[in-house]
Image (spheres, grey):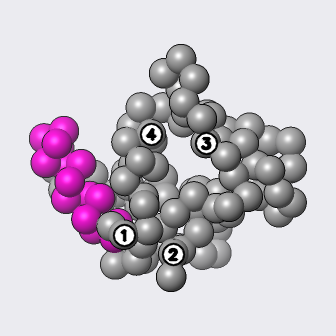
Amino acid sequence: MNENVNVNSTYILSENVVARKIEGETILVPIGAGVGNLEEDLYTVNESGHAILSMLDGKRTLNDVVASLSSEYNVDKDEMKADVVGFTNELFWRKILVESS
């Protein structure tokens, strides 16, 4: 992974990805070329990932997401930051998330 997300930036789901919550799982479906490893890849996200994704609305920075989730789930901010940044970075690298303007 060459690119890293910035905790002071905002991110949103790529327009080339559709997210659906089905029976407690969030499924990410690439609908355009260049997303994920193959165009036919499907990604499933657990509840923690869903909580992060739901806050990546293009308005909140990653720092905002970390502060909110660490408070909501009573988790140490450094631990939450590592989780949020790691998750976001992975999806950014796969072009599932993009930095918003």
Examine the rendering and report whether any part of residue 94 can be seen. Answer: no
Query: Which residue appears farthest toward the bottom when viewing the image?
Result: 101
Q: Determine whether the residue tagged by mark 1 lies in a helix, strand or loop.
A: loop
Q: Is residue 69 magenta?
A: yes
Q: Nearer the viewer, mark 4 or mark 3?
A: 3
Q: Determine whether the residue tagged by mark 4 lies in a helix, strand or loop.
A: helix
| Magenta span of residues | 61-75
Of the two numbered discs 2 and 1 on the same chain, state the one appearing first in sequence. Answer: 1
Examine the rendering and report whether any part of residue 95 can be seen. Answer: yes
Q: Who is closer to the viewer here, 99 or 6? A: 99
Percent coordinates x, y for residue 60 in the rendering: 33, 67
Residue for badge 2:
100
Marks 2 and 3 in Cβ contact (< 8 Å): no
Residue 56 lies, with reference to residue 58, above or below; the image says above
Q: CA distance from mark 4 to mark 3?
A: 10 Å
Q: Determine whether the residue tagged by mark 3 lies in a helix, strand or loop.
A: strand
Residue 19, disc: 3
Of the two numbered discs 2 and 3 on the same chain, state the one appearing first in sequence. Answer: 3
Q: Determine whether the residue tagged by mark 2 lies in a helix, strand or loop.
A: loop
Of the two numbered discs 1 and 3 on the same chain, state the one appearing first in sequence. Answer: 3
* Amino acid type assigned to the residue bearing label 3 in the image: Ala
Residue for badge 1:
59
Q: Who is closer to the viewer here, 25 or 4? A: 25
Residue 81 lies, with reference to residue 61, above or below; the image says above
Q: Specify few, some or many for label 1: CA neighbours under 10 Å numbering under 14, 14-19, or 20 or more.
A: some
* Amino acid type assigned to the residue bearing label 2 in the image: Ser
Marks 4 and 2 in Cβ contact (< 8 Å): no
Q: Nearer the viewer, mark 4 or mark 2?
A: 2
Of the two numbered discs 4 and 3 on the same chain, state the one appearing first in sequence. Answer: 3
